[in-house]
């Protein structure tokens, strides 16, 4: 349920905005989600997968929590820096600045919540984290349309959602953490002692490549939206965002399937159960192929009519973009899963270079392609980047597995 809500966040809110305040506001919300997710990767700093697979307990939960406090402060600094840049160079108006800032604040709460998710998962209570997430976002879904309908102001509605998100987080953590934590983890202190600095630095050093991957991944995934934001209108941004929504559904549903297996996979790799480990990997790749195939068939048959009805916008001209983006979504899911597998194998240091390559290609090429060919150019460029990334990760995984099992 949490996985489906996570996949539906931007979809649900965009549907509501399009029907109440119009396509231009939906376009601003689309770029706000893209920037918010990018900034949230700074807040999370790639720690989650390392935390839940820390079988040897190299770092205590208090170190993970204090590290998260530091990275969220870093995230807020990055948000303010970007908004100053956008105000001066991209000529954002105050309303657009407010919308982006509030979405980033909602994701800042989620970045803090994520470290508790990781702790609950290590305590075999992933359900508690899922409940926390569900209650918080269902509360947002309930308040958002009411606030938007009566206020007719997207920024005001998002302010209320941010406040509600923070309240739900504090309440859920108060009640759930106390009942689940072990004795040595009781009491939450964010005060960083002198002895903590070295451990926090060591943890950040170990996960830096994971952070770089998460950051570059989100940048590459949303690079077409940044190019559209710079070259085209908010209305076109909204339409591209509508047909791009299903792309991330494949990856999120895949994440929902494999997340509960991470601890077991880490234990299998630790025990050198190579055949079982490989079997799990191929089985999950088959799941990705199945999800992608179903999504492609469904999109070809009913995708555009359904999306046009959902978003109250004629998207007939965007069918080509939808099919290309869905195929790219399958490649995205594969690359994301292979990066997790390599993290379990503690080969995460090899993951950053492929993303650096595709990010550089995106920076150099996308704005010019979008300016000349519009949204279809953005879709073609995106699927090319995802395919290149998959090929690189496949080669790295094969070589790493052979070297570690030789």
Image (spheres, grey):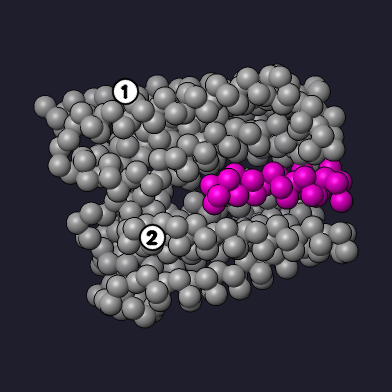
Asked if residue 339 shows in the view, the reply is yes
Q: Circle 2 sits on which residue?
A: 125
C-alpha gap between disc 1 and disc 2:
35 Å
Q: Quadrant of residue 203?
A: bottom left
**Residue behind mark 1:** 395
Q: Is residue 12 magenta?
A: yes
Q: Nearer the viewer, mark 1 or mark 2?
A: 2
Q: Which mark sits nearer the N-terminus, 1 or 2?
A: 2
Q: Residue at x 22, y 60 (%)?
A: 58
What segment is highlighted magenta in the picture? 1-30
Q: Callout 2: few (<14), some (14-19), or many (20+) C-alpha neighbours within 10 Å? A: some
- At mark 1, the secondary structure is helix
Give the residue at x 36% y 28%.
283
Q: Secondary structure at mark 2?
A: loop
Q: In the image shown, does 119 or 230 lie closer to the viewer?
A: 119
Question: In terms of image quadrants, where is residue 144?
Answer: bottom right
Tell me what residue is drawn at x 85 percent, y 29 percent: 314
């Amino acid at each position: 349920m949490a996985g489906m809500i996570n996949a539906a966040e931007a979809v649900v809110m965009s549907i509501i905005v399009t029907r109440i305040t119009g396509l231009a506001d939906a376009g601003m919300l689309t770029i706000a989600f893209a920037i918010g997710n990018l900034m949230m990767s700074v807040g999370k700093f790639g720690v989650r997968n390392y935390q839940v697979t820390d079988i040897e307990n190299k770092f205590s939960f208090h170190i993970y929590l204090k590290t998260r406090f530091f990275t969220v402060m870093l995230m807020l600094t990055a948000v303010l820096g970007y908004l100053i840049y956008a105000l001066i160079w991209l000529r954002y108006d105050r309303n657009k600045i407010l919308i982006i800032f509030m979405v980033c604040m909602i994701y800042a709460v989620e970045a803090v919540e994520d470290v508790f998710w990781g702790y609950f998962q290590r305590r075999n209570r992933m359900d508690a984290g899922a409940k926390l997430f569900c209650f918080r976002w269902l509360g947002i879904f309930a308040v958002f349309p009411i606030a938007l309908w009566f206020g007719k102001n997207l920024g005001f509605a998002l302010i209320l959602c941010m406040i509600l998100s923070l309240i739900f987080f504090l309440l859920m953590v108060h009640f759930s953490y106390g009942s689940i934590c072990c004795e040595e983890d009781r009491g939450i202190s964010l005060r960083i002692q002198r002895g903590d600095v070295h451990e926090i630095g060591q943890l950040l050093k170990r996960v830096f490549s994971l952070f770089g991957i998460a950051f570059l991944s989100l940048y590459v995934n949303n690079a077409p939206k940044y190019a559209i934001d710079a070259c085209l209108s908010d209305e076109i941004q909204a339409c591209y965002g509508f047909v791009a929504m299903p792309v991330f559904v494949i990856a999120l549903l895949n994440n929902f399937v494999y997340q509960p297996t991470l601890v077991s996979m880490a234990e299998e790799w630790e025990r050198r159960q190579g055949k079982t480990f490989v079997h799990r990997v191929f089985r999950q790749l088959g799941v990705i192929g199945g999800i992608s195939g179903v999504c492609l068939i469904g999109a070809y048959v009913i995708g555009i009519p359904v999306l046009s009805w959902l978003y109250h916008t004629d998207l007939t001209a965007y069918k080509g973009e939808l099919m290309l983006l869905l195929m790219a979504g399958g490649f995205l899911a594969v690359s994301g899963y292979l990066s997790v597998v390599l993290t379990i194998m503690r080969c995460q240091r090899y993951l950053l270079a492929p993303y650096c390559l595709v990010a550089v290609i995106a920076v150099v090429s996308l704005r010019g392609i979008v300016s000349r060919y519009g949204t279809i150019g953005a879709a073609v460029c995106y699927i090319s980047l995802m395919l290149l990334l998959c090929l690189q990760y496949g080669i790295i995984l094969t070589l790493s597995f052979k070297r570690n099992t030789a």
